[in-house]
Structures are given as structure tokens and as C-alpha cells.
Image (cartoon, grey):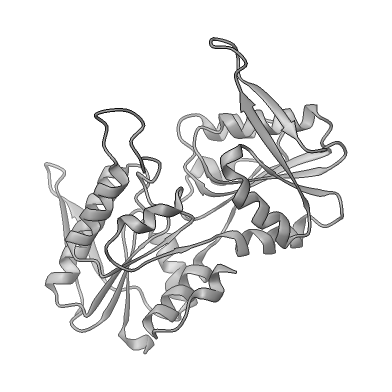
Amino acid sequence: MKSSIKIIAGNASRPLAEAIAAYLELPLAKCMVRRFADMEIFVELQENVRGEDVFIVQSTSFPANDHLMELLIMIDAARRSSARRITAVIPYFGYARQDRRTSGRTPISAKLVANLITEAGADRVLTLDLHAGQIQGFFDIPTDNLFAAPVMVRDIKERLSGGDRMVVSPDVGGVVRARAIAKRIDAQLAIVDKRRERPGESEVMNIIGEVEGRSCILVDDIVDSGGTLVNAAEALLNAGAKDVSAYITHGVLSGGAVSRIAASRMKELVITDSIQPTQAVKLARNIRVATIAPLLGEAIGRTATESSVSSLFD
């Protein structure tokens, strides 16, 4: 069955796609993605995919619009080349934070992007740690939302031993995610509750839980500017935490996030390669990348053989 799998890499996720292909002991399918002088994207599949099970690996990370358009065109190219089935493997699903209307006359961009991927010709979607789980329902095709938790738990158990570990959610909205990690490593749970007592006043971070003398592990799905993460780490240390590490699935790390984290008192930030790490990330003293290639590779292999992927959620 492996012989019928074709792994195609988009420009946003080529190193990850190569690692996935290596895990499956398959070569990457030959695909050329280039730009014309006016920056239009052109895609050419350079080998036969007729009747094949095609998996296109492409995060829609920065620059989100370029990478999204590239993904759509690659899907269309595979569809017009008579692929038997096309799975869009989107490790980081951009626009996921626009999953609802926040005020009048605003779009639900996550739903629009889901429609675009479906209309382009994808038969199913495989993604990781969606910012909002209900986005799975935006697709009219089968969608598997994997979790990076098994990768994180394995890493935590290997590197952060001892009974003084405490998992911390950086906000109330991430409690479910943090609780799941805490349960797996048999640790207690704390929450950073951010609030403004009065309009115009600075945001105050209240710690719910006893963190004094603990090795705190912040858990979240996305780190963007890094401000919330650094402030949460500072609040925990000021409350007596022994040290603070963070495990976050998607390292968006926009603007000055890397330098902000590098200058912080945080012991370590661990992200996955759902978004290709920049050179600055690779050189940062306290940022480390854990690969999700085996997780995605296993999911792709099971999808191709029509096997269950349920155990990958555990």
C-alpha cells in the first residue's frame, strides 16, 4: 500500500515533509512550485499521480496568504492529474483564530478557508491542534485533528523528572488542554487568570494554584508575539516558582517574539516543527524544536491503509 502513497511538499513545510517521507521510507514526490515575474504561483507535478493516494504537506503559516494559495493550487494540480484521493496535511492551520464573529460586519475567515480547501478538490484534511476544535465542523469533508500532547508528554517525562512538576494554563481558555497534559504526567494544575479590575488599568495576572517551589510547565497551542507567555512566566516566578518551561504546539513567533523570549527568565520554550523554524529560532538560547514528523507520518500511513487513527489521539 505504501507504493500508492505520494507525499508532496509545499514551500512552507518542506523539511517536515522530508522527515515524514523518511519516517514512511518513501521518497518525496517531485513537484515544482515557482513564481512568475508578477508573483503568480505556478505548480507542476513532475511525476505520475494518477490513481494514487496524494498527501500534500503545507502549513498556512506566514506569509499565510501565499502559503494558502500555494496549497489550493497544489490541490487543484493533483485533482486535475487524476489523483485517487487528495489529503491536505496542514500542520498549522492559519486563520484558525478567526473562527467566529467578534463584532458586527466581520467575517468568519476560518470557515471561508475551509470552503476554499474543499472546493479546490481536497478529499480529506489532516491537521494538528486546531486553535478551536469546532473548526473541524467547518469542513464538509473528513477532518482529523491530531494532538501534539503525546509528543510533549514524552519529552516532559524524559527531561523534567521529579514530583515538583506543575502544569499551568496561561489563560482560562486553555484549561482543558493543560489538564490533559497534567493528567498524563501525574502533575497538579494551575491557571494564570488575566484580568483588568478597571478600564484603563494594566492587566493583572492572578495565579490560581500553589506554585511556590514548583517546576512550572506552561502549555498552550500557539505562541505569537510571546508577550502573554513571558508575562505569565514572570508572574509564576514572582509567585515563587522554582523555574518555568513552556510547551507550545505552534511557534508563530511573529515580530520580536524570539528576542523577547530569549531575554526572559524562562528556562525553555519547546515548540514543534508544525511551522518551519526560522534561523533566529534555531539560534535562540532557550527555544527548542520537537518534531511531529513521526506523529504525522503514522497518521498518513494509517489513513492510506484505511486503519484507525484513534490511538494517535491518546
Question: Would residue 121 be found to the left or right of residue 271 on screen?
Answer: left
x 43%, y 80%: residue? 301
- Picture coordinates of residue 53, whole percent (x, y): 29, 79
Quarter of the figure with residue 101: top left
Vertical placement of 257 versus 2: above or below? above
Vertical placement of 47 versus 288: above or below? below
Quadrant location, the C terminus: bottom right
The residue at the far front in this view is 104
The residue at the far top in this view is 200
- Picture coordinates of residue 305, whole percent (x, y): 39, 86
Question: Which is nearer the eye, 51 or 34?
Answer: 51
Question: Which is nearer the eye, 220 or 45?
Answer: 220
Quadrant location, the N terminus: bottom left
x 28%, y 66%: residue? 141
Quarter of the figure with residue 205: top right
Quarter of the figure with residue 213: top right
x 78%, y 59%: residue? 186
- Picture coordinates of residue 106, whole percent (x, y): 27, 32
Residue 92 visible somewhere in the drawing: no
Q: How many labels, in total?
A: 0
Question: Would residue 39 be found to the left or right of residue 133 on screen?
Answer: left
- Picture coordinates of residue 226, whole percent (x, y): 56, 33
x 60%, y 40%: residue? 284
Question: Would residue 73 be found to the left or right of residue 134 on screen?
Answer: left
